[in-house]
Image (cartoon, coloured by chain):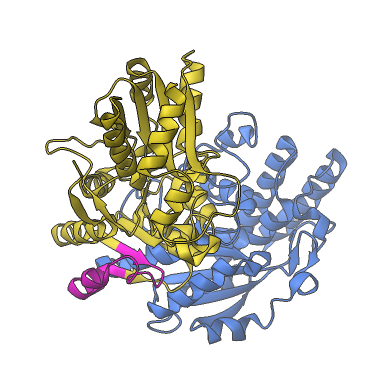
Amino acid sequence: MTVNELKIKSIEYRRRLLTYIEKANAGHTGGSLSCVDILNVLYNRILNVSPETFKDPGRDRYVQSKGHSVEALYVVLADRGFFPESDLETLCRFGSHYVGHPTRKVNGIEQNTGALGHGLPIAVGMALAGKKDGASYRVFTLLGDGELAEGSNWEASMAAAHYGLDNLTAILDRNTLQITGRTEDVCGLEPLTEKFRAFGWSVRETDGHDHADLERTLRAVPFEPDRPSLVIARTVKGKGVSFIEDVAKWHHGVPSDEEFERALAELDRAMAAACKE
Amino acid sequence: MTLEQGKANLEVFADTLLELARADRNVLAVTSDSRGSGKLGPFGAALPDRIVEVGIAEQNLVGVAAGLASCGKTVFAVSPACFLTARALEQIKNDVAYSGNPVKVVGISAGVSYGALGSTHHSIHDLAALRAIHGIDVVVPADNFEAREAILAAARSPRPVYVRFGKRALPHVHAPGARFEIGKAIVAREGKDVAFVATGETVCQASMAAMELEKAGLSARVVSMHTVKPLDAEAVLAAARACRAMVTVEEHCVFGGLGEACAAVLMQAGVSIPFRIVGFPDEYTMTGSQLEIFGHYGISPEGLAKTARALLE
């Protein structure tokens, strides 16, 4: 798959996740648009996992700590064949397994998440199990930047470095927005690179919407032997739809019919441009 | 007649865990600077690569344990019950119970074992908190036999289990040949006047109360309700049918624990008998040794016998 094909996939993923959010009248629009390029590269280029190998003890594991961006995960998993895409018609409906945060009732999902600050400790446990078993699988987790205020992340960061978990990669969706506003206004997080380095991690930054840059960075893990890797993916919340981009209220804003049509029109133009490349 | 003295359940736990880990390389203990209080020093010395230390970080302790369990490990997450079931409650709820990761959550020095250290170190909320969470069994062993069997059963179980231990040496409450199964109460003593339905380290108090009552010509049934969830409703109803009154006993706040669970069973079955819940009232619990605190709140042989006599009058 070429970089341009990945780019086209991302536009299609954005179309679909907006479609299901609009239909369900529920969802986390901004964060899903923010992380969908990361998930695209992970599932199509990096992770050694497929519907056939999902129960294989040797599979790579992905834990989505920022569980609220589940719509992005659903459309990527559906595209990879973990379940029929038509299942997503039931998103957030009464009794549907496709609820507003990841659960193991959905094929392809490793852990139930949604409460923030839970993914990294679980990923540390998975990576530690791999080390104990001499297994070659790798563990990836996607963190939101707002959730870094949860102390459990820092507890887990210390443990990851203490145990030299170079089979663990955390990706930070650094879109700088949380529900209330800018992360740096709510309760400042920076300097994140220095903080994680001080905690014993190896850190690299990447453009979280540049598929080539993401792939290059994720293929380079572990960045150093015996250290966990952190990828700070610089992203834009709501990426791909101009009026949703970088606006805090779109954290869980749902587009109106008119906004939905405008969003699809923008994505159609982006698709036409990408197809000409 | 007195009960024969045994060891602290905590020591039985540590010995049993070492035995399990020697037999199965997938058995791990995860600790939060708690190997000393968990009597796991010998475990760590014998099998250093089988103990995972995370430092004083209970949330991470449970999250890491869940991750390990999801990869096929039989994980015992060991930490003082007061911190483990309060600070890491969300991890127990989501990462263990909701995700179905079969971690064995082991609360040590539970109840008022750390009695003199004050309310920060008491765990008298844990049964209520964990009873309200779907997908985890709650087991409180009464003596060394139950402690060993509970650990073996928890290790075999495909489900998450919370097991709670104290640190005081306990008398044996069961006759040889007793059978243990999670969810099945054990009748430690037959009787027809009053039924003590007790859990954990209060069962021996109830057994001694039964001996007191016997001297006064009253016979007391003692039911060890080691599994608080799922509750053995049949055993509660059988005790109510066999006796004229019921006293529940627990090392826990009277809200949301064993007593209210038994009351719900009786009321919904339409059974009405004189009934008392003995536990800690809604106040900051007195401090002192576990037995001193028990005595203050009537969880003593004399106190329980008195409560039973008052109900029977």
Query: Residue B157 falls in which quadrant of the image?
Result: top left
Task: Judge whether A190 appears above or below B166 on screen.
Answer: below
In magenta segment, residue B35: yes
The quadrant of the picture occupied by the N terminus of chain B is top left
Nearer the observer, A95 or B274 = B274
Q: Which chain is yellow?
A: B
Which residue appears at 55% of the width and 47% of the height?
A: A102
Decide which of B292, B89 is in the foreground and name it.
Answer: B292
The answer to whether residue B272 is visible is yes
Locate residue A179, reporting x and y percent: 77, 59
- Where residue A171 appears, as percent x and y from the top left, is 56, 69
Front residue of this view, candidates B203 and B309 = B309
Name above or below for residue A115 compared with residue A234. Answer: above
Q: Nearer the viewer, residue B49 or A214?
A: B49
Q: Position of residue B134 (x, y in %)?
A: 48, 38
Q: Using the rendered view, name the quadrant where residue B50 is placed.
A: bottom left
Count of all numbered marks drawn on residues in the image: 0
Q: Which residues are magenta?
A: B29-51
Q: What is the quadrant of the C terminus of chain B in the image?
A: top left
Instruction: List x then y, in percent, for residue A106.
Output: 49, 41
Give above or below for A9 relative to A187.
above
Chain identifier, blue in the render: A
Horizontally, residue A128 falls left or right of residue B6, namely: right
